[in-house]
């Protein structure tokens, strides 16, 4: 067994490298008109199960209207909606979040233009240097995952040690990306105030903890895939940080795990999707849930575009350790997670594939 399993593995590595060195991404494969996908993209049956069972129910992630969220004091019914959504779904969609619809449209269209350029224009940004300000790549976890997925990504660090200067951002989407950074930060700030109030904390608590101090955008394209039943757009995973704010175009594909079911997230015009990350599940001592999600490979001729911003803390405690916030702990609600170090957090993310165990499972008491 060992020899054939090993030779299969070596073949795979060679093919992975060839794909990587082409710097053309899955967009390149899709544009070349392939009718079958290379085998490095074929997922094992267990991650494909339930792929094409259209969800039987019509349940949807909660939709929350933020029109009056800024009133002082914050309307308790909105705080309650956000808290319930974060506790039971870990995912919700917000409308009237303050970002003009024209900015949403322009951002999507600028990202689409970047990905639709010829290979020569994009390949100078192609890299796997996670800590460079700007990185264009296919499958951040290409060398760590068991199977590759059908998407490419433009990554830009908005804030933190790796943050990009405007000049580094590809010109074709520069102005839109720079503006998006401002918009998404403001929208996230609004949501974090409500999430803090939902835990009984001061509205500014997460701002004080620097929730937005390390902020990175990943702008994905999910091009047409000729065999969408054999692969995924993105493997099932949870997001590691505090929260994620996601803008998507009208092509559906994102699914959220709710109980035993994969629920389709239907794009709502003008809406933004927010989800809770592992870090927030831990600091909230399990009140808010970081939930598995995945993206189906796109079988439509039109590409699916998503612009995803991850928010992470920049200020760690002096001990460089983190854990459930002490103010949330009581004798009735003791800590359910142990503290973890910054090193553990980063290693857990950067040394593994998206599909591996989250930090949460490792530090559960
Ligand atoms: O593209 C999407 O809708 C989801 C992407 C995602 O989950 C991620 O980048 O972490
Ligand atoms: Fe995600």
Image (spheres, rainbow, N blue to C red):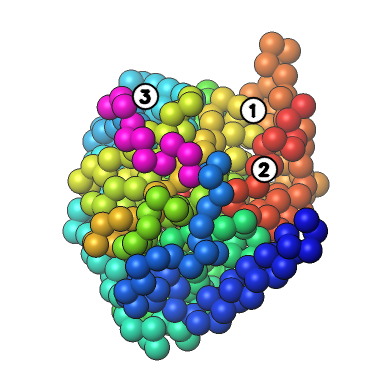
Q: CA distance from mark 3 to mark 2?
A: 30 Å
Q: CA distance from mark 3 to mark 1?
A: 19 Å
For label 2, the residue is 357
Tell me where the magenta segment starts and ends, as one range. Answer: 48-58
Q: Examine the image and state in which quarter residue 190 appears.
A: top left
Q: Secondary structure at mark 3?
A: helix
Is residue 347 something one can see in this rendering?
A: yes
Q: Secondary structure at mark 1?
A: loop
**The N terminus lies in which quarter of the figure?**
bottom right
Q: Residue at x 62, y 56 (%)?
A: 146
Is residue 198 something one can see in this rendering?
A: no
Q: Examine the image and state in which quarter residue 274 appears.
A: top left
Q: Residue furthest bottom?
A: 120
Q: Residue at x 65, y 42 (%)?
A: 358
Query: Within the magenta stretch, is there residue 300?
Result: no
- Disc 2 Cβ-to-ligand 2 distance below 8 Å: no
Percent coordinates x, y for residue 18 in the rendering: 57, 79
Q: Is residue 6 above or below residue 288?
A: below
Q: Is residue 299 above or below residue 293?
A: below
Residue 47 placement, left or right of 317: left
Q: Is residue 172 above or below residue 35?
A: below
For label 3, the residue is 81
For label 1, the residue is 285
- Count of number-bearing discs: 3
Percent coordinates x, y for residue 324 in the rendering: 68, 32
Percent coordinates x, y for residue 348 in the rendering: 70, 51
Residue 171 placement, left or right of 216: left
Q: Residues within 10 Å of mark 2 (few under 14, many from 20)?
A: some
Q: Secondary structure at mark 2?
A: loop
Magenta stretch: dominant secondary structure: loop
**Front-lying residue, 166 or 61:** 61
């Amino acid at each position: 067994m060992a020899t054939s399993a090993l030779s299969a593995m070596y073949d795979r590595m060679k093919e992975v490298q060839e794909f990587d060195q082409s710097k053309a991404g899955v967009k390149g494969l899709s544009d070349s008109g392939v009718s079958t996908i290379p085998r490095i993209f074929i997922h094992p049956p267990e991650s494909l199960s339930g792929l094409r069972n259209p969800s039987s129910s019509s349940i949807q992630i909660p939709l929350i209207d933020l029109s009056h969220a800024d009133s002082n004091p914050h309307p308790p019914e909105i705080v309650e909606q956000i808290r319930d959504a974060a506790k039971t779904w870990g995912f919700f969609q917000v409308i009237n979040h303050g970002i003009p619809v024209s900015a949403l449209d322009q951002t999507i269209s600028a990202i689409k233009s970047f990905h639709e350029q010829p290979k020569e224009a994009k390949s100078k940004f192609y890299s796997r240097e996670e800590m460079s300000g700007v990185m264009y790549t296919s499958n951040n976890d290409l060398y760590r995952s068991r199977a590759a997925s059908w998407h490419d990504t433009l990554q830009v660090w908005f804030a933190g040690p790796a943050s990009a200067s405007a000049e580094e951002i590809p010109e074709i989407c520069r102005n839109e990306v720079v503006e998006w950074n401002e918009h998404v930060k403001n929208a996230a700030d609004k949501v974090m105030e409500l999430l803090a109030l939902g835990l009984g904390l001061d509205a500014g608590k997460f701002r004080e903890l620097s929730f937005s101090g390390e902020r990175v955008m990943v702008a994905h394209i999910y091009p047409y895939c000729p065999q969408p039943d054999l692969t995924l757009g993105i493997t099932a995973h949870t997001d590691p940080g505090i929260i994620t704010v996601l803008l998507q175009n009208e092509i559906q594909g994102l699914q959220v795990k709710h109980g035993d079911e994969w629920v389709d997230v239907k794009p709502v015009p003008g809406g933004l999707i927010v989800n809770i990350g592992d870090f927030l599940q831990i600091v909230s001592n399990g009140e808010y849930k970081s939930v598995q999600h995945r993206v189906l490979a796109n079988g439509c001729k039109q590409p699916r575009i998503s612009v995803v911003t991850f928010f992470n803390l920049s200020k760690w405690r002096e001990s460089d350790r983190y854990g459930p916030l002490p103010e949330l702990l009581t004798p009735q609600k003791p800590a359910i997670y142990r503290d973890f170090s910054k090193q553990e957090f980063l290693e857990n993310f950067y040394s593994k594939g998206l599909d591996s165990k989250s930090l949460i499972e490792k530090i559960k008491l």
